[in-house]
Image (cartoon, grey):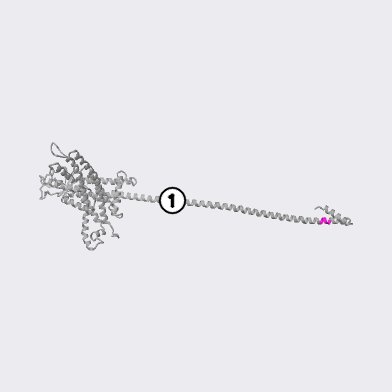
Amino acid sequence: MTYICTKIQTIRLVVNMPKPFYTYFVAFLMVSLNTLYAKTSNTKDGDTPSDLKSEIKAYILHHLEDAHDFNLLSYKDKTSGEKVYIGMPLPVILWDNGLKIFSSSKLKHGKSVVQLGENHYKLYHGKIYKTDAQGTITYDDHDHPANIKPLDFSITKNVVSILFTALLMFFLFRGLAKSYQKNGRIAKGVGRFFEPIILYVRDEIAIPNIGEKHHRRFMGYLLTLFFFIWFLNLLGLTPLGINVTGNIAITFCLALITFVITTLVGKKYYWKHIFWMPGVPWPMKIILAPIELLGLMIKPFSLMIRLYANISAGHIVLMSLIALIFIFKNWIGSSLSFVLAFSISIIEILVALLQAYIFTVLSALYFGFAVEEEHEDH
Amino acid sequence: MEKLINEFSFGLFFWQLFIFIGLVLLLRKFAWKPILDTVNERETSIRDAMNAAEEAKKEMASIQEDNQKVLKEARAEREALLKDARSNGAEIVAQAKAEAKAEADKIIAQAQEAIQNEKRAAINELKNQVAQISLDIAEKVIDTELDSREKQAQLVEKLLKDASL
């Protein structure tokens, strides 16, 4: 974890992006959380932490991860002492020598073993493992579960959020496109708000970075990317407890698409710049080629880590500050925490937009490099 | 790094890839293309309209200029016409005067000539009458006796007195 944090910082230095002040704080926080997380894992019973602080930490870490059901809140029933969850179950889809589909309510948040034919499945720390009928989890030397993990294509909380965002975007922008036809080429309704943003993406992100000639090809991707990240970032700030853009699989996927597009559209000039840098003596060319090749990988990697780290950090800070209210339990400390949490929330709304902007700008910049044509001043 | 790899869920990656690429393709066809096309069209039409307005403004100005020019020319022409008319009038009057004067002079000259002729005729007549009277006197003188010289002189004197001219 510390390694990642330093990695993040080096990558940040590489791309030279502005950094919100609190990410340092978060880097520290993540390190401390991680050590604690390791401790609670070592007890092999993460569901019943001993004190309030570790409960909060487990809760935050749990929130950051994807879930197999859409829970809004949970509480402990006073009479039975059992945890009661309020929310909806989602379908679990497994590939384990054939498709296995069942409702996540059967998993009972890891408390019960699901039997499907001869196979038994158990949820353990957010992941589904294949177990025996009793649901025993065996551990390897590093205290990681050694059980087989079937391929998990479940419609998880994050998948539901992505689907929701996709539908929202489709109807929103389809509506805008339709309102043009109906209203004589002038946007109507909510489209009036989004039209200037679309124009901003075109005029301030795509055209300056890619160029007037080629930008049209990339507009579809850039616009979708921008609104997708922005909407999901904002959705993450709602009390629904969603953390999609702070998930490494999501940011990896987005960065991968940017990387694939950059590689596919790369012209002769772009590849020449990587493998045989023009305008430098030949020993330098040999030295520069591996560096440039490494840069090729670092660019999407930095995209992936930047979005992941910023959004995760925001969620951790915000939840920690809210949790502080319950830790202090006095008028001064709790109200101070509330004010802090409130101001960080406002900043997070800005960060949501900023991160979507940065991801889009950098993607456009990389596309611009790829389609750049040879000109005289090089 | 280990935590990140541990956190990576292939299922979520698969769904994200699937949904996101689907979303890009769908939005490209049904939203971004019509939106960007419309916006471009609108921008071109606005630019065209502005250019047309600018053109119209220029045309208007040139028309106005032309009008001014035509007006100026018309004014100058009128001025010239008036001037012409005025000078023509004066000329005509002068000519008329000159002609009138010439005519008058001619008439006066004719009149004078006529007077001269009459005068000459009158003098001739007078001369003839004087001769006649002289003859008559001579006859009477001859008729009466001219004895003395004194008588003759008295007679001539008497006759001359009678002969009133």
User: How many numbered marks have been drawn onto this rendered protein structure?
Assistant: 1
Magenta stretch containing residue A175, yes or no? Answer: no
Coordinates of residue A263 in the picture (x, y in percent): 24, 56
At 40% from the left and 51% from the top, the residue drawn is B54
| Residue A51 appearing in the image | yes
Locate residue A77: give its quadrant: top left
Between A263 and B143, the one lying in front of the other is B143
Query: Please, which chain is the residue tagged with disc 1 on?
Result: B
Report the predominant secondary structure element of the magenta stretch.
helix
Specify few, some or many for label 1: CA neighbours under 10 Å numbering under 14, 14-19, or 20 or more: few
Instruction: Give the x, y percent position of residue A162.
Output: 22, 46
Give the camera-side residue of B19 and A61.
A61
What residue do we see at 79% from left, 56% from top? B127
In the rendered image, the residue lying farthest to the front is B150
Q: Nearer the viewer, residue B2 or A132?
A: B2
Is residue B134 rendered magenta in the image? yes
- Asked if residue A181 lies left or right of residue A77, the reply is right
Residue B135, position as x, y percentages in the image: 83, 57
Q: Amino acid at mark 1?
A: Ala
**What is the secondary structure assignment of the residue under circle 1?**
helix
Position of residue B83 in the picture relative to residue A267 (left or right) = right
Instruction: Say whether residue A297 is left or right of residue A117.
Output: right
In this orientation, does residue A86 appear? no
Residue farthest top in this picture: A79
Magenta region:
B131-135
Give residue A368's position: percent from left, percent from top: 27, 55
What residue sits right under mark 1 in the picture? B61
